[in-house]
Image (spheres, coloured by chain):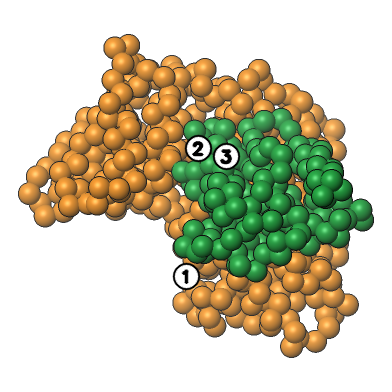
């Protein structure tokens, strides 16, 4: 399946997870990885399944590389009808704004009529799990869901 | 032969630089050299021990050594001129096509006022190195405080210090804060912490989230003064909002009061018998004075150079300091380049820009005939490598105290014993 992974990163941890997903699943799927800072909302290909990876920074803000995309989306009336997306967050439960970055991004995408597939999972930097150990099975489940949806259509 | 690059300093700026260089050209031969036997610099020795999430960037850096072919060369002291060291910067430049200085700024900025030499006055760098079990702190007397502590400075380093001093002994779960440090802080029985800086509250340097975090510790009472100086600030000022979340916290069983004051400049530290007794402040316009009785003053007003690499001359004579170019084949990144400003992500962006400048310059450089690390390995027999760090890392995780994630080796001797497989085993 054709999949676009878009990441919003501040320290590079989310970028690394994107690369890990590409290495893990790149032989089974046609995966393109892009930094959100290099993407404009109106350029999204609505026929391709998009996987967003997004951290939080500071006081529950979006990470630096996601901000221009979010600002552009917020300021526009871009219609994302037909776009199926899944979203994975990275956060730190030391802060009460845990996972707010990915939440903001998910809400904006839905508000612009994109369709969220499956739950938003958030990796906790305080927890014992590695981000990829959570993200890999989550990614497989989301891809399976999208494949099932496509087959049904 | 690929070009050979030595990055001095295995902290976040040096590691991000290596990462960015390899993204631009994965054929480069990149070595990261550190004075300490272990990598990661401020991630290990500067980021607060109770901010383990922030230390998570070390996983990216581990990839450099584990998968991307970067070599770690530890326990090598590079210096300039009369500072001792094992090899001079000039000698190192002969061995590599490119040398990048990413050693940061380690020295505490002085207040420059009377009384700074009194017993009881501690710099934030010296204190946080001690709390983080930096091996250079190993032989120093233990960092201890009195019951009344004044922290001068309003940045995130000051907030880290206030948070750690004001936490209860049981509030370091999941950190790598040594139990010996937590016990010492608890034993001091700190009753009052004054946090005082020059800026008015709405312009203070702290990140709001750092202030809010202090409010989460149990049994603290907060006092916020001098907000009249921020009367003209906008209603949605996030610093004022963060301080407002603290202002209402005043439990009956408070064990310590944390007081925030703004708009005060330190003028004099006063002592008796060589020991600090109080800190004196004034308004910028001299209209008011303030005396704070203090057993301990911690200065957290920034960092400066230790002159070991001749930074002042290098920066003054730089080809283009904005892009990190100091001289042909010599570059600077991170705090060494830009001064003591900015968090880990800001220095990541800085390293990406410097890496782009280096790769651009390398395009017009002939293929390498430099010996690189082979010359260092032939000359020095006590260098440490990444495998040595992995042995130390494993040991530190295996010998951990209850409620902690790591128990750091505290001396060079113990680190080197493990790192170099020497017979003496660490205690």
Q: Which residue is mark 3?
A: A99
Taking the image as shown, residue B254 lies to the left or right of residue A125, namely left
Identified at 45% across, 19% down, the residue is B168
Q: Residue furthest right?
A: A27
Identified at 49% across, 29% down, the residue is B142
Identified at 34% across, 16% down, the residue is B255
Q: Colour of chain B?
A: orange
Q: Is residue A19 visible?
A: yes
Taking the image as shown, residue B162 lies to the left or right of residue B278, namely right
Instruction: Tell which of B273 and B231 is nearer to you.
Output: B231
Chain hosting mark 3: A
Chain hosting mark 1: B
Q: Which residue is mark 1?
A: B312
Taking the image as shown, residue B297 lies to the left or right of residue A16, namely left
Instruction: Tell which of B46 and B8 is nearer to you.
Output: B46
Residue B193, image quadrant? top left
Q: Which residue is mark 2?
A: A97
Q: Colour of chain A?
A: green
- Say if mark 2 contacts mark 3, CB within 8 Å: yes
User: Callout 1: few (<14), some (14-19), or many (20+) C-alpha neighbours within 10 Å?
Assistant: few
The local secondary structure at tag 1 comes to: helix
Residue B90: x, y in percent? 66, 73
The local secondary structure at tag 2 comes to: loop
Residue B132: x, y in percent? 57, 36
Q: Residue furthest left?
A: B287
The local secondary structure at tag 3 comes to: loop
Residue B115 versus residue B139 in the image, above or below: below
CA gap, disc 2 to disc 3? 6 Å
Residue A87 versus residue B427 in the image, above or below: below
- Say if mark 3 contacts mark 1, CB within 8 Å: no
């Amino acid at each position: 399946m054709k999949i676009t992974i878009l990441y919003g990163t501040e320290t590079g941890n989310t970028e690394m997870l994107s690369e890990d997903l590409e290495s893990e699943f790149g032989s089974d799927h046609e995966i393109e990885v892009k930094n959100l800072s290099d993407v404009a909302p109106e350029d999204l290909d609505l026929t391709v399944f998009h996987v967003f990876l997004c951290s939080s920074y500071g006081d529950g803000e979006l990470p630096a590389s996601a901000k221009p995309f979010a600002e552009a989306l917020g300021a526009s009336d871009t219609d994302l009808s037909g776009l199926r997306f899944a979203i994975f967050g990275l956060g730190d439960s030391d802060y009460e704004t845990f996972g707010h970055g990915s939440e903001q991004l998910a809400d904006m995408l839905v508000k612009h009529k994109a369709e969220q597939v499956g739950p938003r999972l958030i990796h906790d930097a305080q927890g014992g799990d590695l981000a990829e150990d959570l993200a890999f099975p989550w990614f497989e489940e989301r891809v399976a869901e999208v494949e099932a949806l496509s087959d049904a259509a | 032969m690929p070009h050979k690059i030595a990055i001095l300093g295995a902290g976040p700026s040096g590691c991000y630089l290596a990462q960015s260089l390899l993204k631009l050209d994965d054929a480069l031969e990149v070595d990261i050299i550190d004075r300490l036997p272990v990598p990661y610099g401020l991630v290990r020795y500067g980021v607060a021990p109770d901010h383990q999430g922030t230390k998570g960037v070390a996983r990216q850096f581990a990839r450099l050594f584990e998968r991307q072919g970067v070599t770690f060369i530890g326990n090598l002291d590079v210096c300039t001129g009369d500072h001792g060291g094992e090899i001079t910067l000039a000698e190192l430049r002969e061995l590599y096509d490119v040398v990048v200085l990413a050693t940061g700024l380690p020295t505490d900025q002085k207040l420059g006022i009377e009384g700074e030499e009194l017993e009881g006055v501690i710099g934030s760098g010296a204190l946080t190195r001690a709390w983080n079990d930096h091996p250079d702190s190993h032989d120093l007397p233990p960092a201890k405080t009195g019951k009344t502590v004044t922290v001068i400075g309003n940045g995130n380093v000051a907030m880290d210090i206030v948070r750690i001093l004001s936490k209860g002994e049981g509030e370091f779960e999941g950190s790598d804060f040594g139990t010996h440090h937590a016990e010492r802080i608890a034993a001091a029985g700190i009753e009052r912490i004054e946090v005082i800086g020059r800026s008015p509250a709405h312009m203070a340097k702290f990140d709001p989230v750092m202030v809010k975090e202090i409010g989460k510790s149990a049994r603290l009472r907060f006092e916020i003064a001098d907000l009249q100086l921020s009367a003209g600030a906008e209603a949605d000022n996030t610093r004022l909002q963060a301080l407002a979340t603290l202002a209402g916290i005043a439990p009956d069983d408070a064990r310590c009061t944390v007081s925030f004051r703004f708009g005060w400049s330190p003028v004099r530290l006063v002592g008796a018998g060589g020991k600090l007794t109080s800190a004196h402040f004034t308004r910028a316009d001299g209209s008011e004075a303030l005396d704070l009785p203090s057993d301990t003053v911690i200065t957290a007003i920034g960092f400066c150079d230790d002159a070991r690499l001749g930074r002042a001359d290098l920066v003054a004579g730089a080809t283009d300091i904005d892009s990190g170019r100091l001289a042909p084949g010599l570059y600077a990144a991170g705090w060494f380049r830009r001064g003591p400003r900015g968090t880990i992500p800001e220095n990541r962006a800085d390293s990406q820009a410097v890496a782009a400048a280096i790769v651009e310059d390398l395009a017009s450089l002939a293929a390498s005939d430099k010996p690189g690390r082979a010359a260092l390995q032939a000359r020095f027999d006590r260098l440490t490598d990444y495998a040595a760090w992995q042995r130390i890392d494993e040991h530190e995780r295996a010998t951990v105290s209850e409620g902690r994630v790591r128990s750091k080796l505290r001396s060079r001797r113990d680190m080197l014993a493990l790192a170099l497989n020497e017979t003496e085993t660490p205690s």
